Every structure is written in structure tokens, then in C-alpha cells.
Image (spheres, helix red, strand yellow):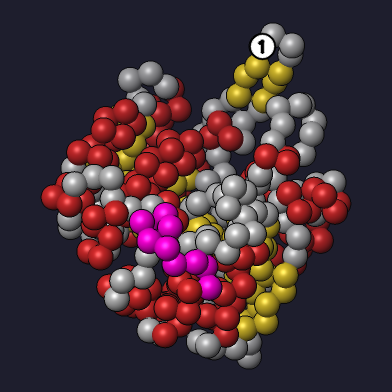
Amino acid sequence: MAYRIVTLPGDGIGPEIMAPTLDLLSRLGEFDFEEHLFGGASIDAHGVALTDEVLDACRRSDAVLLAAVGGPKWDTTEAGRPRPEQGLLGLRKGLGLYANLRPVKPLEALYEASPLRRERIEGTDLLVVRELTGGIYFGEKTRTATSASDLCAYSSEEIERIARTAFTAARRKVSSVDKANVLETSRLWREVVSELHAREFADIELEHVLVDNAAMQLVSSPRDFDVILAENMFGDILSDEAAMLTGSIGMLPSASLGAADPATPGMFEPVHGSAPDIAGRGVANPLAMFLSAALMLRHGLGLASEAAAVESAVQDALDAGLRTADLGGDAGTAQAAQAVLDHL
């Protein structure tokens, strides 16, 4: 039986990197791809970034593969105007995707592409586990002509379930990030994480790191991290910072997961944006999209060997000299995709 995959090409370079990814997947198994408008493209067609019909289709799928959303066309601060990012928040909330996993492992072939010296990043292999459906992004918002507010709120249950995800994924240590010297939500975060650690995961080392210190350590000694656990906004910022360790944000995939029982379809997407400045030119790096498809195969569909095949093909292509523009080379999207397929 073919797996049912909802594809959301989105905006900007999204359709350009989605097409070769579906070609890649078609060589690995049987999939039924169901494409829908999302983000800015959906705003243009329907007036909203995520329609009820698309959300229902995602709920019925085995997994959701998303490329990119956003662009200056829809960038507005006007209250009540739809923005593409609202589709992302709606999809995460609607599917109950509370855990965002962002693996960061610089490949040896790209050590020189990183803005950090080789000796800083060598041996780095970390995972950012970001809480995805709570915090300031989802809190109550107010706005007047002269003031605005965003509520940051977390419950013990929300904190415990994302902390359990982090401890389960850890090999040796969880670095829990907060701002407990200032924020009440962070004090609760620290208490709940500590209690869960003592109760169920005492064999895993736990350290609490203030977010500003974590940002500094990510560029000074990234290899010291194993799993970074963070609330929504802190995780958003730190994972983008960590992306640069790989040489380009165009190399970083992500997985957004929900409850395993009953099974919730996961959503898989590259961390980078829609890059409207290069859209339509055929130069976008498709590798983060390929690696996101690999995460879908492993975490969404349980196809571990197929996922490993994709990851090995990407690494082999880079070892053989593949470099897109963001990595200091001149390979276009089609050339990069073919290089990976040649090593698959």
C-alpha cells in the first residue's frame, strides 16, 4: 500500500525544491502525493494561509512534507491581515505537533564552509528539541495604537511532554535552556524538567543553561551539546543559530511530531525560508529539503534504511565536490539534485 503524503510547496523557492524531492522519494518506494496550496499561495487563492480543507487533508495523511512559506508580498504589520506564517502556526496547532526536532551535524566535506573555524565545529552532533505549540507565539495578543503585548504561558503538562521527548532522544546529556533568573515561565520550566529528570531519566545528565549563555556556547563549544531542550521562541532562535555551524541554513532539516498514540501525522520541512530573492532562478539548494524527506522516512513512516540511503547520498555527493551557491560553489538546483540521485 502506498503512503499518502500531503505536499505543501508553498512560496518562493518552495516549488523548486519540492519537485526534485518527490522524484527522489519516488525512487525509494510507493507514495501517493497530494499537493495543496499553503502560505502566501493560499492567501492569494483563498484569503487565508491555511484552509480547513487543507488541514483536514493533512490530518488524513501519513505525513506532511512542507517546502517554504512567506515573502515580501505578504509581509505586513497591519492588524487582521493574513500572513503566511499563520498557516504554520495553524498547522502545528491543528495537528498537535508539539515537538520540533532539528539535528545539527556538520559534515566533514563542509567544515570549510562554516563561518566558524574547523576546530570549533569538528565533532559536533547535536539535536535541538523545541516546544512548538505553546509560549509567546500562541499566547493572547493585544494591540492599540501605542502599545502591544504578547502573553507567554506554559503548563506543567506542556513542559513535561516536550522534556520527555528530549530525554528520550538524548545519548548522554540534556541542556535545558531557560531564562529562570527573569521569567516566571522559565522557573516553572526548570522545576518541571528537574522533577521529570529525577523521576524517570536520572541516567541522563541534565544541565540548566540560561538562553544568553546557550547562544554563546553554541558558537564557542558546540560539540559539548548533545540535546538542547528549549521553549518555543528560544528554540526558534537557537536552532537558526545552530544551522550556521553546518555552513549554510540551506543544509538543515526539521521534523515536527505529535502524539504517538493515537498516531499523529508529522510535518517535515527545511529550516530555511522561501528565499524570494532567488526564486525562479534555479539556484536554490535542495539538500535541506532532501534531508527533511529523510526525517519523514525515518520518524514519520518508519523507513529507516530508506532514510539512511538519502542521507548517505547527500553526504557522498558533497564528498564528491557538490557545492551550491550558498556553500561557495556554482551548482544549481537541478545539478545538485542529480548529484544526489547519482549516489542514491
Most extreme residue toward the front is 330
Q: Is residue 287 above or below residue 185?
A: below
Residue closer to the observer: 60 or 270: 270
The residue at 48%/36% (across/down) is 233
Residue closer to the observer: 336 or 308: 336
The residue at 65%/46% (across/down) is 70
The residue at 80%/31% (across/down) is 80
Residue 326 in magenta stretch: yes
- Give the position of the N terminus as an image quadrant: bottom right
Residue 255 placement (x, y as % from top left) = 49, 60
Is residue 302 visible to the viewer in this orientation of the structure? Answer: no
The residue at 17%/52% (across/down) is 118
Residue 117 in magenta stretch: no
Label 1: which secondary element: loop
Most extreme residue toward the bottom is 1
Q: Is residue 144 above or below residue 339?
A: above
- Give the position of the C terminus as an image quadrant: bottom left
Name the image quarter holding residue 326: bottom left
Q: Residues within 10 Å of mark 1 (few under 14, many from 20)?
A: few
Residue, disc 1: 147
Please indicate whether residue 274 sits to the left or right of residue 46 in the image: left
Q: Count of labels shown? A: 1
Is residue 272 visible to the viewer in this orientation of the structure? Answer: yes
Name the image quarter holding residue 322: bottom left
Most extreme residue toward the left is 119
Most extreme residue toward the top is 146
Disc 1 marks a residue whose amino acid type is Ser
Residue 317 placement (x, y as % from top left) = 35, 75
Residue closer to the observer: 23 or 208: 23
Residues drawn in magenta: 325-334
Please indicate whether residue 195 sits to the left or right of residue 58 in the image: left
Residue 82 placement (x, y as % from top left) = 77, 39
